[in-house]
Image (cartoon, grey):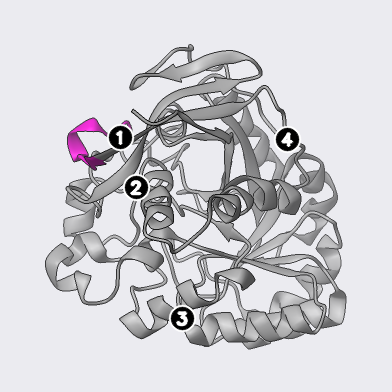
């Protein structure tokens, strides 16, 4: 067998672990187990909980719950609808970034774009503002970045009409980064027929021409982010938007490397180096992932995520997570978590 593949611990700046409030979908323990099973040693959780995390009190409550459950390291993004600017100074001490939703998504946590400028000015931090901003609003959002020079990360870019304005902003020297998800790289709108409601997500799956545009412009994409968004099977049948991704992202990307779509160096940069840089997180050489270089098929039955399904079930991939080491200690090995709940750190 070929040599074990060794990678630095992966960092996902975009997950939804649903805790507190919707733990039937996922909780901090099952979600961070899924993270380790996918080679992620650090994840950053979004604020669109059942009760959105828009006050420091709610953020502290969330952190308190997480401390007792997480097995990977975790950080938290704060949220805003433009009516909590007085919370920002305290929130910046606890949160890793500020997440704003400019399109309808899970929780209907939607911001009026007219509030953007005052929010950007009030946040005024090296810590990024992260945007859910699809093609209809992306140019408006980037104008605010141009005015304020506030570091801005555009999440889950899904098509040409979203990526082109970002490319133009980058060329103009604006402090803009962006991420893309595996579901937008490996699935297109043709897959919706096969997947049914399991293919429902925000942003929606796009035509193959958009998918090809993303692959052909990977040089402008800073991070691969899972946008891990689990729902129960019942909730998906009822039309919930979102798919899990923490356990399938790395093997999908290693398969893409095998097919010549991405280099190992770029994979490391987009899954570890750049996410750390965006958040301001240093790398620990005693934290790493060992991967067995073998082909296998993704299986719903083997997932640690509480939701228990993946849109990539039965898909052939490459690279099985063998061992995850954090700060010199084995935390995951041969399919099983090796540490107790609460052993991960709060970032």
* Residue 302, percent from left and from top: 23, 31
- Element type at mark 1: loop
Q: CA distance from mark 3 to mark 2?
A: 27 Å
Figure disc tally:
4
Mark 3 sits on what residue? 213
**343 sits to left or right of 280:** left
Compare marks 1 and 3 and give the one earlier in the sequence: 3
User: Disc 2 designates what residue?
Assistant: 230
**Residue occupying the point 18% across, 33% down:** 301
Q: At 41% from the left edge and 48% from the top edge, which residue is drawn?
A: 254
Mark seen at residue 283 = 4
CA–CA distance in space, label 1 to label 3: 33 Å
Instruction: From the image, tell me which residue sits under label 1.
Output: 306
Between 93 and 114, the residue placed more toward the observer is 93
- State left or right for residue 275 relative to residue 255: right
Query: Residue at (51%, 79%) from the top-left corner?
Result: 134
* Vertical side of 247 occupied by 316: above or below: below
The reply to whether callout 1 and callout 2 are in contact (CB within 8 Å) is: yes
Q: Earlier in the sequence, mark 2 or mark 4?
A: 2
Inter-mark Cα distance, 2 to 4: 28 Å
């Amino acid at each position: 067998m070929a040599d074990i593949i060794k990678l630095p611990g992966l960092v996902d700046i975009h997950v939804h672990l649903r805790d507190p409030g919707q733990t039937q979908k996922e909780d901090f323990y099952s979600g961070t187990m899924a993270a380790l099973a996918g080679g992620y040693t650090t994840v950053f959780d979004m604020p669109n909980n059942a009760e959105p995390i828009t006050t420091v009190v709610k953020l502290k409550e969330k952190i308190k719950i997480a401390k007792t459950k997480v097995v990977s390291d975790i950080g938290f993004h704060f949220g805003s609808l433009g009516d909590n600017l007085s919370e920002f100074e305290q929130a910046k001490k606890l949160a890793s970034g500020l997440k704003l939703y400019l399109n309808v998504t899970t929780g209907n946590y939607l911001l009026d774009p007219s509030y953007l400028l005052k929010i950007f000015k009030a946040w005024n931090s090296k810590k990024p503002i992260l945007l859910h901003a699809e093609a209809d609003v992306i140019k408006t959002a980037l104008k605010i970045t141009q005015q304020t020079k506030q570091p801005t990360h555009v999440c889950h870019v899904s098509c040409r009409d979203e990526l082109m304005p970002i490319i133009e902003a980058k060329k103009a020297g604006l402090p803009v980064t962006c991420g893309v998800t595996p579901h937008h790289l490996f699935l297109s709108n043709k897959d919706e027929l096969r997947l049914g409601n399991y293919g429902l997500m925000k942003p929606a799956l796009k035509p193959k021409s958009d998918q090809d545009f993303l692959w052909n412009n990977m040089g402008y994409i800073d991070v691969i982010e899972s946008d891990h968004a689990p729902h129960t099977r019942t909730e998906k049948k009822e039309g919930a938007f979102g798919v899990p991704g923490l356990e399938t992202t790395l093997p999908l990307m290693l398969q893409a490397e095998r097919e010549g779509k991405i280099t190992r160096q770029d994979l490391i940069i987009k899954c570890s180096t750049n996410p750390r840089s965006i958040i301001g997180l240093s790398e620990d050489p005693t934290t790493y992932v060992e991967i067995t270089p073998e082909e296998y098929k993704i299986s719903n039955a083997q997932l640690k995520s509480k939701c228990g399904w993946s849109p990539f079930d039965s898909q052939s991939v490459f690279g099985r997570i063998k061992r995850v080491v954090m700060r010199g200690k084995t935390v995951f090995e041969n399919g099983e978590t090796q540490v107790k709940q609460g052993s991960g750190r709060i970032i």
